[in-house]
Amino acid sequence: MEILDITLYLDGGTIGIQTNHGAFCIDRRIGTETKGKLYRGYPKSDNSNICNDAIKDDILTALIEERIIKDHKELLEKLSKNIEKT
């Protein structure tokens, strides 16, 4: 899995991660009960798009590998810390 782009939403800080396997988000919305959860796409109100542990591991591995890119180093470190592992 490759990280193609990282964006921040103005909903309290949800982090969007575009990969070659699709779009994912780390939930950081204001007032959310699922802070830190990883979703396929933007978090749905019924939580039907929460990712499984295999996807979480793939995202974390891609983020760790991506750290060599200087421009995103600080953001990637924050992202790695914000993905909740169950």
Image (cartoon, helix red, strand yellow):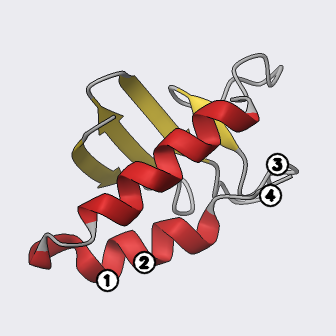
Circle 3 residue: 34
Marks 4/2: CA–CA distance: 24 Å
Specify the amino acid type for callout 4: Gly
> Is the residue 7 above or below the residue 78 in the image?
above
Given the image, on which type of amino acid does mark 3 rest? Thr
Q: Residues within 10 Å of mark 2 (few under 14, many from 20)?
A: some
Distance from disc 4 to disc 3, alpha carbons, whole Å, reads: 9 Å
Task: Mark 1 vs mark 3: give the one in front.
Answer: 1
Amino acid under disc 1: Glu
Tell me which residue sits at (80%, 25%) in the image.
Answer: 47
Q: Are marks 4 and 1 in contact (CB under 8 Å)?
A: no
Is the residue 42 above or below the residue 76 in the image? above
* Left or right: 75 in relation to 53: left
- Give the mark, 1 or 3, whose residue is nearer the N terminus: 3
Q: List the residue tagged with mark 1.
A: 74
Disc 1 on helix, strand or loop? helix
Q: In x, y percent, where is residue 64?
A: 39, 64
Marks 1 and 2 in Cβ contact (< 8 Å): yes
Q: Residue at x 51, y 54 (%)?
A: 60
Is residue 7 shown left or right of residue 56? left
Of the two numbered discs 4 and 2 in the rendering, the one whose residue sits closer to the viewer = 2
Q: Quadrant of the N terminus?
A: top left
* Residue underneath mark 2: 77
The residue that mark 4 highlights is 31
